[in-house]
Amino acid sequence: MAGNSKGGIPPALIAVAAVLLIIIAGYIGYATLLKPAAAAPMDKAAEQRSDWIKTLAKQSGGDMSKLSKEDAEKLNTMTNGHAAAALKDKLAEN
């Protein structure tokens, strides 16, 4: 008789199946544990705030001292004290 006399599964097929199983398990682990989460879509209010900050950034060139007192206070409140960073971030997006 030729081939495997025991009639079992060939060792090469078992090795290929094991490698595929390891690859699939690795991908599932990456996708669930390590892959960065996608950003949530902005709602209408968040989009309006973002557009307003972007407009301020363009008008001021990213400089807080060029904003009106009211706009600076509103932006500072909206960003929890990170107004300058928000302006610079929005200016860099353009």
Image: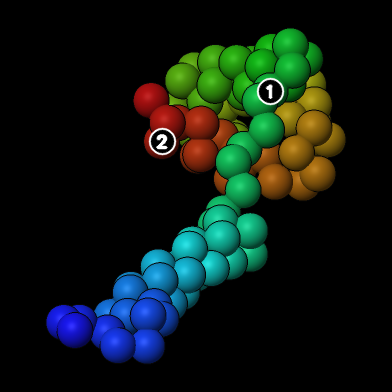
Q: Residue at x 37, y 88 (%)?
A: 6
Q: Is residue 41 above or below residue 83?
A: above
Mark 2 touches mark 1? (CB < 8 Å): no
Find residue 91 and report its horizontal and vertical position in percent: 45, 31
Q: Which of label 2 and label 1 is nearer to you?
A: 1
In-image side of 6 versus 25 (left or right):
left
* Amino acid at the residue labelled 1: Met
> Under tag 2, what secondary structure?
helix
Q: Nearer the viewer, residue 56 or 42?
A: 42
Find residue 39 and report its horizontal and vertical position in percent: 62, 38
Q: Is residue 34 above or below residue 81?
A: below
Dot 2 corresponds to which residue? 92
Specify the quadrant that holds the N terminus: bottom left
Specify the quadrant that holds the C terminus: top left
- Circle 2 packing at 10 Å, graded few (<14), some (14-19), many (20+), is few
Query: What is the quadrant of residue 9 in the picture?
Result: bottom left
* Amino acid at the residue labelled 2: Ala
Find residue 65 and report its horizontal and vertical position in percent: 59, 34
> Under tag 1, what secondary structure?
loop
Examine the rendering and report whether any part of residue 14 can be seen.
Answer: no
Examine the rendering and report whether any part of residue 88 can be seen.
Answer: yes
In-image side of 88 versus 51 (left or right):
left
Dot 1 corresponds to which residue? 42
Q: Nearer the viewer, residue 9 or 57?
A: 9
Q: Earlier in the sequence, mark 2 or mark 1?
A: 1
Q: Residue furthest front?
A: 1
Marks 2 and 1, how far apart at CA = 19 Å
